[in-house]
Image: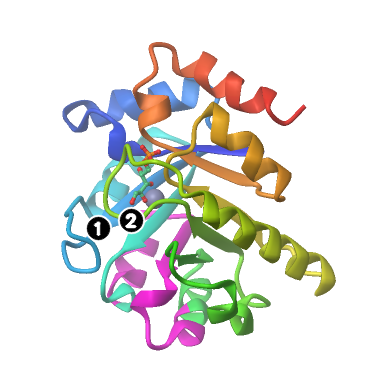
Amino acid sequence: MIIAPSILSADMANLKAEVHKAESAGADWLHVDIMDGHFVPNLTFGANVVDAIRPHTKLCLDCHLMVANPEDYVNSLAQAGADIMTFHAEASQHSHGLIQSIKAAGMQAGLAINPGTPVSAISPLLADVDLVLVMTVNPGFGGQSFIESTLDKMAELDQWRQSHNLAFKIEVDGGIKQETTKACLDQGVDVFVAGSYLYGADNMQQAMQAMRRQAR
Ligand code: DX5
Ligand code: ZN
């Protein structure tokens, strides 16, 4: 399993130290939540923060764009050193073309779906993406509760992946902690984003190990 702490829950005044903390606790990726105050009611940061943390970590920078115009971010994110650019299917009128642009810019392409969006809305794109992000809360804020009805979509994606011989990763984001990790693992999920659970833990390394134990 891949564990990606979300810096949304980090201390923004000490971001460099918070990145190092995740890396030394055993993180596989770092999840970077970019919000524009339009697609979601919250506003965070943009490519400038990706650029600022890039020299301080070798971890894969997994950028999750909760923005209304994801097309506008491809070049700046690629230049900043993002490894993965994931955009919301609900936000783009030209998802197929955007996936091609992200790859042409040298990044991996991810497609995210909100809790209310079915897998069928993105099935024509599944052969083209590197990652599918199943939102397990409504995007915008950390610390929300996991929405159980999203489990069926993970299973559906895993089945589709097997029956079509595809290799995209399945990622979950929102309300992920030790207890919810197991249920997602059982549906075939590969990547686990956790913000408040990991950054709020007294010992991030132990909290991460508790997640990994669910895989045994
Ligand atoms: C929410 C973000 C998440 C957020 C998850 O819209 O996409 O990445 O950081 O936070 P937790 O793990 O606290 O639910
Ligand atoms: Zn996220």
Residue 113 image point, x, y percent:
47, 66
Looking at the figure, which quarter contains the C terminus? top right
The color scheme shown is rainbow
Q: Is mark 1 within 8 Å of ligand 1?
A: yes
Residue 20 image point, x, y percent:
39, 24
Rounded to the nearest angstrom, the CA distance separating label 1 from label 2 is: 9 Å
Q: Is mark 2 within 8 Å of ligand 1?
A: yes
What is the crowding at mark 2: few (fewer than 14 residues within 10 Å), some, or many (at least 20)? many
Looking at the figure, which quarter contains the N terminus? top right
Q: Which residue is mark 1?
A: 35
Q: Is residue 200 left or right of residue 60?
A: left
Q: Is residue 183 left or right of residue 15?
A: right
**Is 142 part of what is drawn in magenta?**
no
Q: Secondary structure under badge 2?
A: loop
Q: Which residues are magenta?
A: 72-98
Among all residues in the image, which is located at the extreme front?
149
Residue 50 image point, x, y percent:
31, 49
Q: Earlier in the sequence, mark 1 or mark 2?
A: 1
**Is 93 part of what is drawn in magenta?**
yes
Q: Quadrant of residue 138?
A: bottom left
Residue mark closest to the camera, 1 vs 2: 2
Q: Is residue 94 above or below residue 21?
A: below
Mark 1–mark 2 CB contact (< 8 Å)? yes
Q: Is residue 93 left or right of residue 40?
A: right
Front residue of 193 and 63 = 193
What is the crowding at mark 1: few (fewer than 14 residues within 10 Å), some, or many (at least 20)? many
Residue type (three-letter) at the residue carrying disc 1: Met
Q: Is residue 210 left or right of residue 177?
A: right
